Image: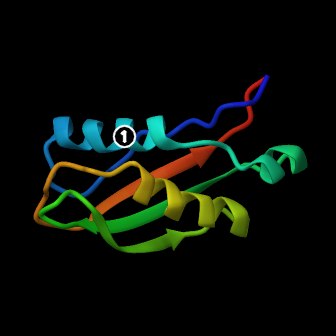
Amino acid sequence: MPHKAEVESGSAGDGLPSDIIAVIERAIERAKTYPLIARKRGLEGTVHVRFLINPRGEPQEIEILKSSGHGILDAATVKVVRKAAPYPRVDRRVEVPVAYRLKD
């Protein structure tokens, strides 16, 4: 049975309403899959990502603020942020910590 990844709850941008933060985090959690090679190697970590959301709900200017220490998890996070769209429109950058943890 494949392991699932978890999304850590965190600050999705200073001053954003908690319901908007929750929508963004749930969208990322639903879209995420744990990269197979990372799972096989037992890699875990948290990627802190920041992005803008355009009027169509698509992420733009995606950047890694803090690496997980594993390039494969960092790259997977950028992909999942794109895959999870559309997001609710917000007028500031969104910051989300995305955690990859192997579950037993």
Question: Looking at this view, is 6 or 14 the one in front?
Answer: 6
* Left or right, 91 with reference to 66: left
Asked where in the image residue 66 lies, by quadrant, the reply is bottom right
* Left or right, 40 with reference to 6: right
Where the C terminus falls, by quadrant? top right
Whole-percent x, y for residue 72 in the image:
71, 63
Q: How many marks?
A: 1
* Left or right, 82 with reference to 32: left
Whole-percent x, y for residue 6 in the image:
57, 35
Q: Residue furthest right?
A: 41
- Residue bearing mark 1: 27
Q: Is residue 1 above or below residue 48?
A: above
Where the N terminus falls, by quadrant? top right
Whole-percent x, y for residue 52 in the image:
25, 68
Q: Is residue 88 above or below residue 50?
A: above
Asked where in the image residue 67 lies, by quadrant, the reply is bottom right
Q: Is residue 67 above or below residue 22?
A: below
Whole-percent x, y for residue 73 in the image:
66, 59
Q: Report the residue at 49% width, 71% height from top.
A: 64
Crowd band around label 1 with a 10 angstrom C-alpha radius: few (<14), some (14–19), many (20+): some
Q: Is residue 90 above or below residue 65?
A: above
Q: Report the residue at 13% width, 58% height from top.
A: 90
| Amino acid type, callout 1 | Ala
Q: Report the residue at 73% width, 27% height from top.
A: 103
- The structure's colour scheme is rainbow
Of helix, strand and loop, which one carries label 1?
helix
Q: Report the residue at 73% width, 30% height from top.
A: 3
